[in-house]
Image (cartoon, rainbow, N blue to C red):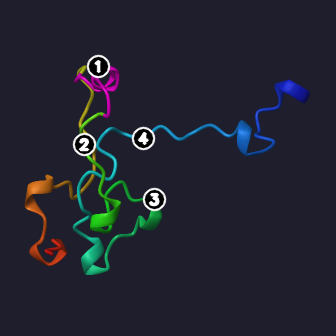
Amino acid sequence: YGNLCKFAHGLCEQRSRLRHPMYKTSLCKDFPLGKCTFGSRCNFAHSIDELRSSLPASPIAAEKHQPQHQPQPQHHHFQPPQQLPAMLIQTP
């Protein structure tokens, strides 16, 4: 198939995965209980180290993430970052 082949033939041909802007911006409430069935595919962070900022990195990125009547992510246990379980908060 040559250039018409739909499969990647090396790392340079692989496309990056598109992620929801809220990906890994809050902790998974099921993981500490040992009940997260999504594992590495979970859209929520399983540790403080996995948490990402929910703010876009640049003004151009901010424009792309403006609400345009898109549905909110559907996940059975979404919780805002300010509701982190006390046992997961690290203090110096």
CB within 8 Å, label 2 to label 4: no
Specify the amino acid type for callout 2. Ser
Coordinates of residue 14 in the picture (x, y in percent): 68, 40
Q: Which mark is residue 41?
A: 3
Q: Which mark is residue 63?
A: 1
CB within 8 Å, label 4 to label 3: no
Question: Can residue 1 be seen from the camera position used here?
Answer: no
Task: Name the quadrant containing residue 58.
Answer: top left
Specify the amino acid type for callout 1. Glu
Upstream in sequence: badge 2 or badge 3: 3
Q: Which residues lie in the magenta part?
A: 57-67
Upstream in sequence: badge 4 or badge 3: 4
- Residue tagged 2: 54
> Alpha-carbon neighbours of circle 1 within 10 Å: few (<14), some, or many (≥20)?
few
CB within 8 Å, label 1 to label 3: no
Element marked by disc 1 = helix
Upstream in sequence: badge 1 or badge 4: 4
Mark pair 1, 2: CA separation: 14 Å
Specify the amino acid type for callout 4. Arg
Q: Residue at x 83, y 25 (%)?
A: 4
> Alpha-carbon neighbours of circle 2 within 10 Å: few (<14), some, or many (≥20)?
few
- In this view, the residue farthest toward the right is 1
- Residue tagged 4: 19
Question: Can residue 76 be seen from the camera position used here?
Answer: yes
Mark pair 4, 3: CA separation: 11 Å
> Alpha-carbon neighbours of circle 4 within 10 Å: few (<14), some, or many (≥20)?
few
Quarter in which the C terminus is drawn: bottom left
Q: Residue at x 26, y 70 (%)?
A: 30
